[in-house]
Amino acid sequence: MIVERQTTSTVKGGNIESQLIVNELHQSIFESYSPINDALRLRNLQALTQSEKEFYIKENVLSYLEEFAGEISLKKLSGILKPDGALEMLGANVTEMYRFTAQNSARDSRENNEMLGMDAILHGLNNGANRAMWISPPKLANYGFGFLFQAGDYDLKLGGRPIHESLIRYDEDFKTLNNSRRIHSQISNWIGETGQKSIRFKTDVDFLKNPILFSESGIDSINNIGGIFGLDGEGMRYSEYFRNEITNKITPWLDRYNAVVQAMANSGLESIDKRIIEMNKEGELLIGAMFNISKAVKRRLDEGAQTCEDDNDLLSRISGGVSYDQMMYTARLAYHYEPLVLSRGSSCPVAQQIGSGEQTTLSSMRSGLGLINSTVNGFESKTTCGERGCSISKTHFHCPGKAEDGRMCKCAIMGTNTCPSCGLTKEKWAEMTGIDCA
């Protein structure tokens, strides 16, 4: 028997004022995800084919569910690798763009060497490899970047292979290459190649020209890569496993959501009429159902199936190949299963937009910035929070305390334990509510 799950917050001290503050923090998921917003964004991407639109809508939904239902911080950029070796993002030819930048740069420039490395990656992914690791040592700061590319199987409708790119930041003194050499060497040894050549790399250019290409099946290898970087490799593996699990559960609803958004985009959104309102309501029902299913999947992964009887009952009712009426009936069950709120109240929600990171990458490249810096900008744009009037792209949160007029403070906080506006400390907040703002 499925019951509606009631989410409550444990409040240290149990005072009513603290409980009210906690309730205020539980923001509706629809403050950060809107079907109409998806439709409006899609209207600016009319150059895409029907299948490409479906691809980017699905990527957007899955990214949202990963971050806010799965509480996974690892983000991805998506693209399509064409048989001729061109990498496309949102229909734009990224390969032509970075080659143009290289041609207008010196032969020994970083931009030219980025072109050589990226050409090698795309060629390898089109000729037997399905993964690539590209190391970019630091130039000015004490950290470098690893770019993990994962290529899916050829998709006839997309006319290419879907590509997912993940960014891994690692510590490195910009005056040395010791950690970069270690990482490159260990990954090379792990895939069965000699890591000796990595030891001889003397500049960042040596790393850019020598990406590591390999083939792996399954998701367990992600754990090894994360460990080599000194990260929680299991957390990276969890991200892949979570996406696989939720995709298997929500595919019928995700396909229907895709159809609803595209119908709205084609219906003329200059005026919001009754038909648009009804389609948006259906879209919200589907998003809510997918969100709660994803939360149930997360609990089963974290706690084990034997401790999640209600979740097991809900998940057992989700199956493909059913009629529209059956699909929407189970969607309503999932939608009402528990409150549709963001439980991470100390962080402000991302205003999710189709292809936001990819669009930032393209815009940076069009402005003349190199491929790697443009890609990093694309990843960083995914951390903007969506708070009205906030344009901060670095990691931050908005103060959950009370201002003098009784409203929530919402002052942006970065790198400090004390709100500069109302004086609330993270320690005081944790004492009042049991919620850690870190």
Image: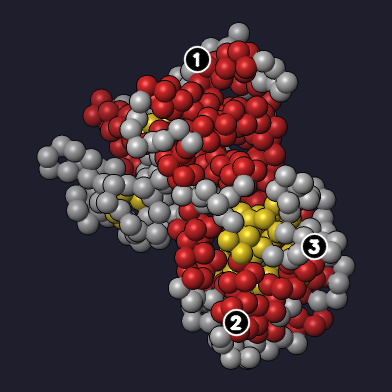
Instruction: Name the residue tied to disc 2.
Output: 102
**Which residue is located at x 62 percent, y 31 percent?**
255
Q: List x then y, in percent, for residue 242.
A: 65, 40
Residue under pointer 1: 4
Identify the element where label 3 is drawn: loop
x and y percentages locating residue 100 in the rendered image? 59, 78
- Residue position marked by numbered label 3 in the rendering: 126
Residue shown at 56%/42% (left/top)? Answer: 57
User: In this rendering, is residue 128 above or below 236?
Assistant: below
Amino acid type for the residue under numbered disc 3:
Asn
Label 2 secondary element:
helix
Please name whichever residue, 347 or 362, is drawn nearer the observer in this view of the structure. Answer: 362
Q: Amino acid at mark 2?
A: Ala
- The structure residue drawn at horizontal position 39% and vertical position 36%, both measured from the top left corner, is 269
Asked which secondary structure carries label 1, the reply is loop
Residue 299 location (% of width, % of height)? 60, 31
